[in-house]
Image (cartoon, grey):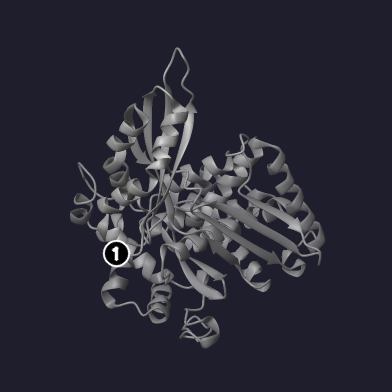
Amino acid sequence: MSKSGHDHGPRHPSPSQGGSVSSRVPGFYKLSIDERLGLLSERSQLSQAEEALLRSGCLSVEQANHMVENVIGTYALPLGLGLNFQINGRDHLVPMCVEEPSVIAAASNAARMVREGGGFVAEADPPLMIAQVQIYDVPDTESGTQAILADKAALIAACNDAQPNLQKRGGGTRDIEVRTLEAATADRPGMLVVHLIVDCCDAMGANLVNTVAESVAARLAELAGGCYGLRILSNLADRRCVRVRCRVPLAVLRSERFDGVAVRDGIVLASRFAELDPYRAATHNKGIMNGIDPVVLATGNDWRGVEAGAHAFAARSGVYRPLATWRAGDDGHLLGQIELPMAIGTVGGTLRVHPGARLGLQLLGVKSATELGMVMASVGLASNLAALRALAAEGIQQGHMSLHARSVAVSAGATGDLVDVVAAELAKLGDVRHERAVQILGQLQDRA
């Protein structure tokens, strides 16, 4: 038992958890920061230096100065833990770096519901990235395409010669594709784009594939009889997708106002709304990225690239669609699934210099970039479930605003225990405004 009196479950990994640290920590939000860090240090075997890193903000100004240009300081965001996540039978404590209230709590609560149905089941494609080489002023796009494909073996060998260390790690260029963007005519030359498909192993792969593209651009242009233009990766990493599914029992879906069937049907109806309307799909997918982006940030990955890939993938049919969908299963329980590209890494880039990013990966306990992608997609699916359940059962504002009330209380000048007292009164009144918080705080101070 902790000194707060809460039973936090097993202190060490059990064989049934596959050697992972349990992500079930009931009452974690009620603990003080010192108690949370103490529990986390014990469960994840953090050193004193690593625990101190969490207290200090994870990044010094000196370290930041080696990461980006014109550094004048650092800008911190809250780092919290997503709890209850079980993915492919393995538990994960999920670091989430985010400023928006309710995101972490909502994802953790949804993960608890999914856990009751057996947890998340995930699979992923190999870590294949696409490097694009633009070839323009091509006099005959058909014969240019044939010439490039006829030389495919030699081109792949040249690509791999440009990245010998990647080959040693088991990666390398796997295939070459040619697409006609603009067919050549009698009056106008055409344009081709060549896709170099590269296995990046555990790296995100941007620098790797850019180098590969540059190494063969001149040869590709020569074969096509044209000129080369851009040589760069595509953030639509549709060869590197993650797919996650889950089952949510009716019993855990019910709310104070509605039974499980009603909540399930509301979620399914909301999913169908997003499938039919791109305006709704945009907000639906934003809720998914509410969960994914904080994990991307906490592990030092490129959240802008992940966002770009996700939204491009959502629009690949020509109509913007939801990344996650929900249905009633044959047994009556709620079934959810998500698919999206996940171009992230566990080596290289920011991870080399940002101690907080390295610590984030340590807390997660993932073994590869592929496993990390499966965790991120699971958190996205959980966030989507939380948002849709709130909409179906109680309205999105009730839970969100009650957590937002703490921030409003602080902005009004509340400190210490008064933060929770003012926040509770704001939530009770259903009036979470700065002006009302100032009024409540003043009344409390006058009584004191």
Q: Which residue is mark 1?
A: 168
x%, y% of residue 113? 66, 68
Q: Residues within 10 Å of mark 1 (few under 14, many from 20)?
A: few
Name the image quarter holding residue 71.
top left
Residue 8 can be seen, yes or no? no
x%, y% of residue 202? 37, 61
Quick one: SS at disc 1?
A: helix
Looking at the picture, tell me which residue is in the foreground, 384 or 441.
384
Q: Does residue 287 lie above or below 376 as drawn?
A: above
Looking at the picture, tell me which residue is in the foreground, 237 or 167.
167
Residue 154 can be seen, yes or no? yes
Left or right for 55, reference 197: left
Q: Does residue 193 lie above or below 438 as drawn?
A: above
Looking at the picture, tell me which residue is in the foreground, 120 or 25.
120
x%, y% of residue 176? 42, 45
The extreme top residue here reads 187
Amino acid at circle 1: Lys
Residue displayed at 41% across by 76% down: 40
Residue displayed at 47% across by 82% down: 19
Looking at the picture, tell me which residue is in the foreground, 422 or 207.
207
Residue displayed at 57% across by 39% down: 316
Q: Does residue 192 lie above or below 305 as drawn?
A: above
x%, y% of residue 105? 55, 62
Residue displayed at 72% across by 68% down: 252
Name the image quarter holding residue 254.
bottom right
